[in-house]
Image (tube, rainbow, N blue to C red):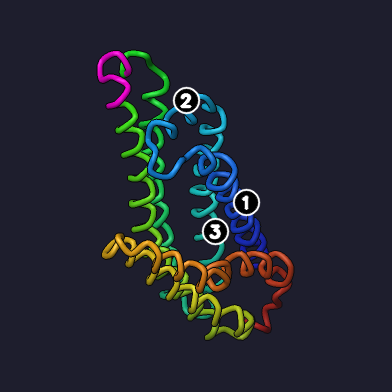
Amino acid sequence: MRQAALIAGVAILLMTLAAVIATDLAIGPLIVQDNPTLTFENIKSHQLQFRIGVLSWVVVLICDVVAAWGLYIFLSPVNKGISLLSAWLRIVYTALLGTSILKYTTILELLDSEYYLTAFGAIQIEAQTWSSLNGFDASWSIGLIVFGLHIFLIGYLGLKSKYVPKLLSIFLLIGFLGYTMIHLSSLLIPQYQTLIEVLGWIFILPILSEVALGLWLLVKGKDIQNDQLR
């Protein structure tokens, strides 16, 4: 169990770092809002940067699988059935993330061959690239609804346990509300972007509670004694 806590904590923190690299340092800066042409030119001119972003997302995917296993082992003493369900929800989310990453591989394919530019023309290539970028965001957003359910069960198990801090568990439960409200809004009422952005700011700390969980697992969780599980 100590090993599972350590592995889960490392996986969550590494996943967070990789996600920041992908969204804020690699792919995000290349995307120009409402400008497919400039966005495609940025990606074409900074292909290595874009590819590092894609690789970072693959690292996130792998870490999510590892975290699902570690959290399942760590929380099984509370309720094995619910812990297993939580792990499966994270695996389902990871599968949806994987399909989202495939949207980026379409862009890589377009970049790798001059044939597509000759056959389809620059405007079509730019439109396909823009569609793939938006497709990633849309499918990942749906995946995060499932991820929110996973977070809810982790928070619930934390509250029921005798070894996970109650405040951390409560923040995880609030984080579930954040994931659900933000990404259901993105799916059902995407025209209300201002509302979605406001919700993002309101729930920013609870949504980051999983990072706090990773830190706690790394620092304190690995030292849980067997007598604390009973």
Mark 1: secondary structure? helix
Secondary structure state at the residue bearing disc 2 = helix
Rendered residue at 53%/37% (across/down): 55
N-terminal of the two: label 3 or label 2?
2
Q: Position of residue 124 (x, y in %)?
A: 27, 27
- Residue 111 lies in what quarter of the image? top left
Which residue matches tag 3? 67
Part of the protein shown in magenta: 117-124
In the picture of the structure, the residue carrying the numbered disc 2 is 44
Categorize mark 2 by other alpha carbons within 10 Å: few (<14), some (14-19), many (20+): some
Q: Which residue is mark 1?
A: 17
Distance (Cα) linking label 3 and label 2? 34 Å
Compared with 48, 7 (above or below) is below
Q: Residue at x 44, y 34 (%)?
A: 39
Relative vertical location of residue 172 with respect to residue 127 in this rendering, above or below: below
- The chief SS type of the magenta part is helix
